[in-house]
């Protein structure tokens, strides 16, 4: 029983080491580049972000139009 | 025993290597990079619609891709599909198990899914021939509760579970295609990348993991939170990940720099984050908390620019529609609110 547990723990540890090796080896970019691209994305898409710039009532599907014609 | 010691040492070495590598790429901070950007003006969103009908706590909601229909799940044992503009209930689906914790709308609009303490993910066909909504599949294999699910298509869905794994399912055969194991704690939430190639998971081991869907491999692990991660989502361009935790903070991790860029926190916020969503440009981060409020953050400047106060109990779920036009919040007070 204890032998099985020991070999299981060994396998788990081997897998953990393999995973860490993989995560250690990835290619990274500088934070300056990453941050600049996030900033650019936000600014370039700002005008297309209704929650950010607001929605005029005439274009707001969730707001009923003010006037009501009954004919 | 000697080998175990060696492996432990190697694990520590590799962890130190990763920390050191991340530091060498940390040539600045997001604050510095955004120093020339003006903070967003105060954001005041109003409740435009209140969706009434559930009789108990709402645990989850998900927008359909048409930005009009959305699905919500409540522990009253119902899944309701709403037309958010008319507030009409398009479908009210009775569930076998009322202990539901998550729901999802397929991108096609044909299917919805839900699951919870029954450990299963049930798929419902909304477009059945006779007009009745029936269970199409019951995906059973998890040995723990279903915390979250998201469709890749009408044939594939990804689930996260309290059994610490995530699974990619083949809906047609009802079988597991891939199992994503690695988290050391309950998986609480997942998000799919805009290109559908990756997904991220947040767990009770305080980490977030990025997974390659086809390779069934964990590519990156992000730490830093001091408690369970309850909510997770992609930044709209797919290059960054936002997490929300019981430690009352949200964090932004960049995937390509492989590190945390910023923490959204305030000493006045002491309640855990339950849910989060990003606005269409990524500039606004909306975070739902246990204290009944939703905090709105300027993501670049890390400043709180608004609050949505309208619920009488915990905000359990939040979602921004695909066209970015509205935000929907769901609460333990049994109501959903549409804001813009």
Image: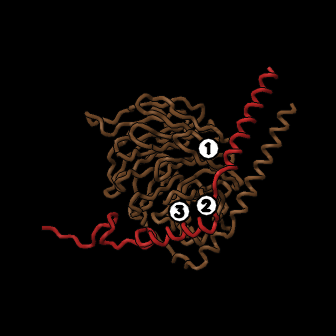
Mark 3 or 1, closer to the camera: 1
Q: Quadrant of residue B257?
A: bottom right
Label disc, if present, on residue B218 of the rendered structure = 1
Q: Which residue is mark 3?
A: B286
Residue, x 70% and y 40% (percent of image)? A18
Q: Which residue is mark 2?
A: B252
Residue count near mark 3 (Cα–Cα under 10 Å), binned few <14, some 14–19, many ≥20:
many
Residue, x 36% and y 56% (percent of image)? B67
Residue placed furthest toward the right: B2
Quadrant of the frame with the C terminus of chain B: bottom left
Whether residues under marks 2 and 1 lie with C-beta atoms below 8 angstroms apart, the answer is: no
Total residue callouts: 3
Mark 2 or 1, closer to the camera: 1
State whether residue B131 appears in this view.
yes
Colouring mode (rainbow / by chain / secondary structure / one colour)? by chain
Separation of residues labelled 2 and 1 (CA atoms): 19 Å
Separation of residues labelled 3 and 2 (CA atoms): 13 Å
Chain letter for mark 2, please. Answer: B
Q: Nearer the viewer, residue B51 or B182?
A: B182
Chain the render paints red: A
Residue A43 is left or right of residue B132, and the answer is: right
For chain B, the rendered hue is brown
Residue B294 is left or right of residue B136, and the answer is: right
Residue count near mark 1 (Cα–Cα under 10 Å), binned few <14, some 14–19, many ≥20:
many
Quadrant of the frame with the N terminus of chain B: top right
Choose the circle earlier in sequence order: 2 or 1: 1
Choose the circle earlier in sequence order: 3 or 2: 2
Q: Nearer the viewer, residue B46 or B241?
A: B241
Residue, x 33% and y 58% (percent of image)? B85
**Quick check: do tags 3 and 2 share a chain?**
yes
């Amino acid at each position: 029983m204890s032998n099985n547990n020991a070999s299981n723990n060994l396998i788990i540890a081997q897998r953990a080491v393999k995973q860490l090796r993989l995560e250690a080896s990835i290619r990274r970019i500088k934070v300056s580049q990453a941050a600049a691209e996030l900033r650019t994305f936000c600014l370039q898409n700002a005008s297309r972000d209704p929650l950010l710039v607001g929605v005029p009532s005439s274009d707001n599907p969730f707001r009923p139009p003010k006037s009501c014609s009954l004919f | 025993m000697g080998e175990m010691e060696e492996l432990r040492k190697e694990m520590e070495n590799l962890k130190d290597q990763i920390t050191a590598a991340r530091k060498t790429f940390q040539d600045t901070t997001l604050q510095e990079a955004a120093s020339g950007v003006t903070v967003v003006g105060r954001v005041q969103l109003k409740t435009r619609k209140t969706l009434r009908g559930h009789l108990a706590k709402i645990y989850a909601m998900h927008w359909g891709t048409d930005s009009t229909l959305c699905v919500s799940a409540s522990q009253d044992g119902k899944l309701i599909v709403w037309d958010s503009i008319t507030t009409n209930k398009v479908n009210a689906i009775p569930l076998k198990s009322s202990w539901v914790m998550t729901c999802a709308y397929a991108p096609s609009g044909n299917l919805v899914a839900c699951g919870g303490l029954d450990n299963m993910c049930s798929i419902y066909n909304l477009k059945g021939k006779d007009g009745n909504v029936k269970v199409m599949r019951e995906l059973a294999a998890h040995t723990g509760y279903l915390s979250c699910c998201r469709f890749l298509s009408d044939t594939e869905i990804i689930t996260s579970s309290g059994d610490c794994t995530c699974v990619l399912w083949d809906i047609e055969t009802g079988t597991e295609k891939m199992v994503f194991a690695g988290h050391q704690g309950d998986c609480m939430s997942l998000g799919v990348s805009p290109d559908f190639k990756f997904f991220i998971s947040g767990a009770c081991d305080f980490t977030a993991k990025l997974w390659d869907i086809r390779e069934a491999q964990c590519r990156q692990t992000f730490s830093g939170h001091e408690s369970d991660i309850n909510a997770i989502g992609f930044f709209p361009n797919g290059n960054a990940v936002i997490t929300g935790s019981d430690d009352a903070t949200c964090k932004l991790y960049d995937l390509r720099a492989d590190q945390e860029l910023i923490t959204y926190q305030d000493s006045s916020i002491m309640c855990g984050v339950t849910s989060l969503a990003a606005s269409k440009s990524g500039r606004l981060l909306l975070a739902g908390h246990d204290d009944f409020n939703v905090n709105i953050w300027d993501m670049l400047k890390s400043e709180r620019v608004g609050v949505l106060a309208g619920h009488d109990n915990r905000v359990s779920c939040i979602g921004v529609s695909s066209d970015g036009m509205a935000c929907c919040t769901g609460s333990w007070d049994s109501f959903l609110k549409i804001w813009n």
